[in-house]
Image (tube, rainbow, N blue to C red):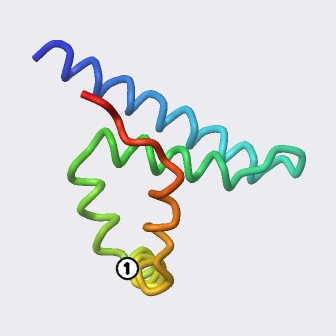
Amino acid sequence: MFFKTLHKTAWLTAGVLFLVLAVIGLLLPIIPQMPFFLAAIFCLVRCSPRFNAWLGRQRLYIRFHEWAEKKHWFERIRKHIPHRQK
C-alpha cells in the first residue's frame, strides 16, 4: 500500500513539474513547450485512472488513435520496442 501511494505521488510530482515547465515554455520562446506537455500527459495518465479515462473520451485523442490504428502506427513502433522478460 505504501509503495503504491509513493508510486502515484512520484508520477503526480513529475507530471506537475513537467506541466510547470511547459507553461514556462509557453511564456519563454527559448524553451520548447510541446515535449514538456507530452511528458506531463504521460505522467498524469500513469498517476490517475480518472485522468486516463477523461483523456480517452476527448475528441482529438480519439481521432489520433483512429488515425494511428488505420496507419498501423502502433504495430510499427512495437516492432522496435523490446519486450520485457519476466
Describe the element under mark 1 as helix, strand or loop. helix
Relative horizontal placement of residue 66, taking residue 28 as reference (left or right): left
Q: Position of residue 2 (x, y in %)?
A: 16, 13
Residue 52, quarter of picture: bottom left
Q: Residue at x 55, y 45 (%)?
A: 39
Q: Which residue is mark 1?
A: 62
Local packing at callout 1 (Cα closer than 10 Å; few below 14, some 14-19, many 20+) is few
Relative horizontal placement of residue 72, taking residue 20 as reference (left or right): left
Give the residue at the far right of this rendering. Answer: 30
Q: Residue at x 66, y 39 (%)?
A: 21
From the viewer's side, name the closer residue of 23 and 61.
Answer: 61
Relative horizontal placement of residue 48, taking residue 60 as reference (left or right): left
Q: Residue at x 47, y 38 (%)?
A: 15
Tag count? 1
Identity, as a three-letter code, of the amino acid under mark 1: Ile
Q: Is residue 29 above or below residue 4?
A: below
* Quarter of the image with the N terminus in it: top left
Q: Position of residue 13 (x, y in %)?
A: 44, 28
* Quarter of the image with the C terminus in it: top left
Give the residue at the far top of this rendering. Answer: 2
Q: Position of residue 18 (x, y in %)?
A: 57, 38
Relative horizontal placement of residue 14, taking residue 85 as reference (left or right): right
Q: Is residue 27 above or below residue 66?
A: above
Q: Is residue 39 above or below residue 58?
A: above
Q: Position of residue 65 (x, y in %)?
A: 41, 76
From the viewer's side, name the closer residue of 71 and 54.
Answer: 71
Q: Residue at x 34, y 64 (%)?
A: 55
